[in-house]
Amino acid sequence: MTLMIMLVLLAWFVGFPSQVTAMFVPSETIRNNTLSFDDWTPPKTHIAYQYVSNNPTPFQELIVNGDFVDGTQGWDIHGEVETKDHLVQIGSEHSILAEHSSVAQLIPNTAKTLTFTYQIFTTEQSAGFDDPAFEVRINDKQVFQIRAEDIHNGSTEVQTVRIDLTQFSEDHLLITFSAGNTGDNENPSWVEFSHVTTIPILANPSTQLTFLIDDLQQSISFIQYSSFTQPIPVAPPFTLTQNPENNTLTFWSEDFSQNKEESLHIPASFNNVAPQPIRFLSTMNAGNGEYVLEFTTPSDDFGNISKYELYASPTPITHETNLSTLTRVEQTQESFHSPLIPEAEETLFINNFDPNTQYYFAIISQDAFGNHSDIQEEG
């Protein structure tokens, strides 16, 4: 009787579709019956940069409460900090503090870019004070700054900045935004900023992307640039060829059982326009292997340049010089990574060169998309 009940139950089990992924049943038990299962599970797709040197990591937002919709939740605050209308104000027009106020957040170092929007205000008119009026530090390294003396008519325009995070090798990044008085407790400066994010895809034609797909079956993936265009099947690695509608890329995957996941969306910007070069680079040999470089920042590229790169050579450098023949110089001044506002004067002090050799220098501007300007040599 027990054996008969077991056979009936087995026949009932085999006769209906199963939603389980798989179940092992000994062949001597199922005998002439056929065991099958249905796959009703859609793929799960993540998009990532395709790096050559390591495994790709899917994009995920690392900043908590980057639009400050929940006040300062997720942020460590110091000094005069106020939230309003989905932005945060650091410092105050009525401040009597002789120091910066700040907000900070610790994130894992798995993102490529940090993006934020800001507007700085100041009542300071004396050179040397509130220098900087606003700065961004990552692991206590200055990556962006604006001086009060470079702000005209009391405020800047609303600007968006992209910071390259690939220069850091630490496991975690402490990102600190600070603003306010430096040098005295009068004529305050303050900043309003928001839209702090690590998630946008920033790409040019050489930026390779890939898909990470979680599915038992082989899947095919699609991207769609706009609601008016047809989906494009893509096989990793792939590159973007145009700017997506509303700067949002749509993508999804489906497997060979025709299971299709819901369309996914990610902020994405495509740019193949090189930033403008710096101007009026001059060099002074200060002796003992030290040099002083002065130059003017571009007049029409504020917010696009993410960093400058410095190169040196024992022979004169021209526009035709190949970058691969030059020696890249690690910047010794922190703010050199931080392009200033348009047409600002920048001074860079570098050392540890052979005092018996005359060196020549050049600078290129580079944006967060990987585009770079022509060489700006001395002269």
Image (spheres, grey):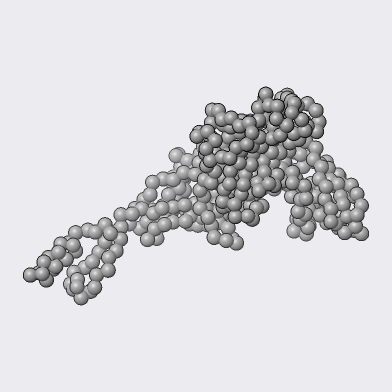
Residue 199 in sight here: no
Q: Give percent across and percent down for residue 267.
A: 52, 42
Position of 131 with respect to 264 (left or right) is right
- Quarter occupied by the N terminus: bottom left
In the image, 296 versus 355, the foreground residue is 355
- Residue displayed at 76% across by 55% down: 328
- Quarter occupied by the C terminus: top right
- Residue displayed at 51% across by 48% down: 60
Where, by quadrant of the figure, is residue 185 drawn? Answer: top right
In the image, 221 versus 165, the foreground residue is 165
Q: Give percent across and percent down for residue 27.
A: 23, 74
- Residue displayed at 85% across by 57% down: 353
Q: Give percent across and percent down for residue 270.
A: 58, 44
- Residue displayed at 81% across by 54% down: 312
Q: Give percent across and percent down for residue 305.
A: 69, 42
Residue 213 in sight here: yes
Position of 316 with respect to 61 (left or right) is right
Where, by quadrant of the figure, is residue 365 drawn? Answer: top right
> Which residue extends farthest left?
1
Q: Is residue 335 above or below residue 96?
A: below
Q: Is residue 110 above or below residue 148?
A: below
In the image, 109 versus 220, the foreground residue is 109
Q: Is residue 117 above or below residue 60?
A: above
Position of 170 with respect to 31 (left or right) is right
In the image, 379 versus 109, the foreground residue is 109
